[in-house]
Image: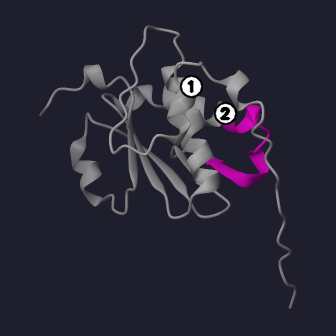
């Protein structure tokens, strides 16, 4: 029987301030229950949200993030693409499995990211164990 070798990966976060809009940088360590990012188009809100989730996936255990948008069709080209881009820009491809077909990302430590659209809320009822939610373009969502 062959034993799996455990590989240690060191991640250099010294460049993090340069990769983040200075307005959002202090929010990496924010532990509030709700975090509302405000800014115009191109201000870095979505980039920061993706970076913070990837950082939490790497540094904390037991996560199952759910990423939501109003319409499921828009997930692949927006939040899913941004999370995938962060993983690749930061050179972390060996630590993540990116399932392109069913929009799912899994970290080597067991943490997961699931994606869903709010245009079919019935599908959300069976999702359990969610530890955090990112609602992209929350201003598009109605209270219902």
Position in image of residue 46 (x %, y %)? 50, 25
Quadrant of residue 8 within the rendered picture: bottom right
Of callouts 1 and 2, which one flags the residue occurring earlier in the amino acid sequence?
Answer: 1
Position in image of residue 77 (x %, y %)? 53, 25
Position in image of residue 94 (x %, y %)? 78, 51
Along the line of sight, the residue nearer the viewer: 42 or 119: 42
Residue that carries the numbered disc 2 in the rendered image:
86
Outermost bottom residue? 1
Instruction: Give the Cα separation between the discs numbered 1 and 2.
Output: 8 Å
Asked if residue 51 lies left or right of residue 143, the reply is right
Can you say whether 73 is above or below 59 in the image? Answer: above
Residue that carries the numbered disc 1 in the rendered image:
47
Task: Check if mark 1's residue and mark 2's residue have beta carbons within 8 Å.
Answer: yes
Task: Say which residue appears at 37% left-offset and 63% top-offset.
Answer: 129
**Where, quadrant-wise, is the N terminus in this rendering?**
bottom right
Along the line of sight, the residue nearer the viewer: 81 or 87: 87
Task: Read off the magenta span.
Answer: 86-98
Task: Say which residue appears at 83% left-offset and 78% top-offset.
Answer: 4
Residue 60 is one of the magenta-drawn residues: no
Can you say whether 19 is above or below 11 in the image? Answer: above
Specify few, some or many for label 1: CA neighbours under 10 Å numbering under 14, 14-19, or 20 or more: some
- Can the viewer see residue 80 in this picture? no
Task: Say which residue appears at 46% left-offset and 40% top-offset.
Answer: 30
**Where, quadrant-wise, is the C terminus in this rendering?**
top left
Can you say whether 10 is above or below 108 in the image? Answer: above
Asked if residue 107 lies left or right of residue 1, the reply is left
- Can the viewer see residue 126 in this picture? yes
Can you say whether 79 is above or below 103 in the image? Answer: above
Along the line of sight, the residue nearer the viewer: 129 or 126: 129
């Amino acid at each position: 029987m062959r034993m799996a070798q455990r590989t240690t990966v060191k991640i250099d976060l010294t460049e993090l301030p340069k990769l983040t809009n200075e307005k959002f940088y202090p929010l990496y360590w924010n532990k509030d229950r709700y975090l509302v990012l405000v800014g115009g188009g191109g201000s870095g809100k979505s980039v920061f949200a993706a970076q913070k989730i990837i950082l939490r996936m790497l540094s904390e255990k037991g996560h199952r993030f759910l990423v939501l948008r109003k319409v499921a069709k828009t997930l692949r080209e927006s939040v899913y693409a941004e999370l995938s881009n962060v993983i690749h820009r930061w050179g972390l491809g060996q630590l993540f499995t990116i399932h392109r077909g069913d929009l799912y990302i899994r970290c080597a430590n067991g943490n997961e990211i699931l994606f869903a659209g709010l245009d079919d809320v019935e599908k959300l009822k069976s999702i359990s164990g969610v530890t955090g939610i990112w609602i992209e373009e929350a201003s598009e969502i109605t209270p219902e």
